Amino acid sequence: MPDQIAGGGLLHRRGLLKATAAGVAGGFLLPAKATEDWMTHSGEAQNGYGSPSRFANLQREQLGGHPFGAEAGSSSTPLQDLNGSITPNSLHFERHHSGIPDIDPDKHRLTIFGEVEQNLQFSYEDLMAYPKESHIYFLECSGNSFRNALPTASDQTAGSLNGLLSCAEWTGVPLHYLLDEAGVNKKARWIIAEGADASGMSRSVPIDMALDNVLVALYQNGEPLRPAQGYPMRLFVPGSEGNISVKWLHRLKVQQTPAYTKDETSKYTDLLKDGTAEMFSLKMEVKSLITSPSGKMNLQRKGVYEISGLAWSGEGAIRKVEVSADGGRTWAEAALQNTSRPLALTRFRIPWRWVGQNVVLQSRAIDDRGNVQPSRASALARYSSGSFYHYNGIQSWQVSAEGVVKNVFA
Amino acid sequence: MSLLKRNVLVLTLFLAGGLTCTSVAKSELANAEAANLPGHDIKPAMGKPVAVTAGTISADGSGLPQGSGTAGAGKTVYESRCAACHGIDGLQPGNQLVGGIGSLATNRPVKTVGSFWPYATTLFDYIARAMPYNEQKSLSADDTYAVTAYVLMLNGILDDEAVLNEKNLHTVSMPNRSGFVELVH
């Protein structure tokens, strides 16, 4: 067909569709009453803190937990229900190691010590006095999408498979302001960040990174951090594995070596086939997925759809996203939004006509450093079969002739 | 610059003459946007000097508290405080602490304290900060050394009578110590 740009029904992004689109839409107009109920009487009064429409069924999915309780578990962002690139605070993914502490900001202190000229302590109010910066950054758990690294494809939604991923505007104090004030010794190479939760989550941050674009974040999407995101303060290390952005931040120890904490040695390391493991693989790699249509959806009609999804890279900005509707045989370039934002989610879109064909939809991101998102096979080839962190292979969604969308390995 | 001083400055500029003041402000704004500068960099130096007595334990043993324990003493602590989740022999699936040595290069790698963890100090640090689950930070330093010794004994790394303390913990030879490639140095 002349309006197709690639196989499987992918369409040119501009101009060629008017007649067809009108024809399709015409058959789907719902009969409307002259007046609906909500047109005839006043609605609810305003309230103190807003909530979504009862018709918008927005829920995170809970992804397991500790045998003693769900508080040491995770919940994932319902990517398939959202659009744009910002995650609402109530739907930001969560991962806790010993639940969410109930911290009184008046009793919380941030202490900087170790290889510094002067150990310093800061209260929440102290930090409020510093210059702040606001940046839109993604946060991705390094275990995100691990199910796609397993031998069998799970029939799940985009969010439950890939939703340990969110994006927000983070506002806080550049960490280097506080480190400069304490006076970091020249031989210092690492900052050990520790949380005030019961698990005392700890990670080592290279000093070059800590002095570059790391924030002590105080606000998320304009409001004070939620307790689940580290209230009253968290470290935010953009582009890096989520676990290093330590929540409930209360200690920063400056030293010459890493601490080799439990999480950075026994957990967030990547086992290679020869039995050795990579350590401090901090950057999250280039990645993308189609969020609509996506797993567990049902296409209810034939006609034109917008394929839409998210792309991101821990190394920079997204330069290009290609979409395939024929299992990777042909690709077309999607339209991108917010490409000027490095280390943030970028929304991509491309029109697609579905006439009942059985197809596999895929997306492939390329960042401005030239990194290309790998196929599932290439992504799996990097590490041992026992390793599932940093999985960034291409996500494949099969659309059946009946319109059922399902996660597949293609 | 304090808020007060800043306000006085603004007021002074305002009184100095409307047109000039407006044009200065506009050109400053344009420059700030062009360079993508943050709004200001007036840092108030609010940090209070403080003495620090606790901190993260490192692989060289720095930060370890005084104390000591043996695997023999650790068995009692382990069985009452740890075994419910980790299994009496440390083999509970999902929370496995023991075994897997030699499995890392196979198709079924088993990562445990014995087979994978590079430093014994990490084990002490983690028990001290995060265990027992829901009773975090309740073990004494002696009990923490003892349980550390017991888990290492279950893995065949220490014998029953070895005494661990703040001076020798970092010298324990872990089987997978050389099994890591550090991507950041």
Image (tube, coloured by chain):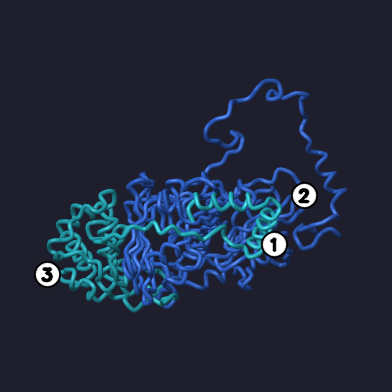
Chain colours: A blue, B cyan
Residue name at image x 20 percent, y 64 percent: B65
Secondary structure at numbered mark 3? loop
Q: Residues within 10 Å of mark 3 (few under 14, many from 20)?
A: some
Q: Type of residue at label 3? A: Glu
Q: Are marks 2 and 3 on the same chain?
A: no
Q: Position of residue A28 (x, y in %)?
A: 78, 38
Residues at circles 1 and 3 in contact by the CB criterion of under 8 Å: no
Q: CA distance from mark 2 to mark 3?
A: 74 Å
Question: Which residue was labeled with disc 1?
Answer: A323
Q: Residue furthest front?
A: B16
Q: Type of residue at label 1? A: Val
> In the displayed structure, would residue A22 be above or below residue A217?
above
Secondary structure at numbered mark 1? strand
Chain at tag 1 = A
Q: Type of residue at label 2? A: Val
- Residue A296 visible from this viewpoint: yes
Q: Nearer the viewer, residue A168 or A267?
A: A168
Question: Which residue was labeled with disc 2?
Answer: A304
Question: Which residue was labeled with disc 3?
Answer: B161
Q: Are marks 2 and 1 on the same chain?
A: yes
Q: Are marks 1 and 3 on the same chain?
A: no
Residues at circles 2 and 3 in contact by the CB criterion of under 8 Å: no
Q: Position of residue B43 (x, y in %)?
A: 46, 59
Q: Determine the image quadrant of residue A53.
A: top right
Residue name at image x 55 percent, y 49 percent: A221
Q: Nearer the viewer, residue A219 or A42?
A: A219
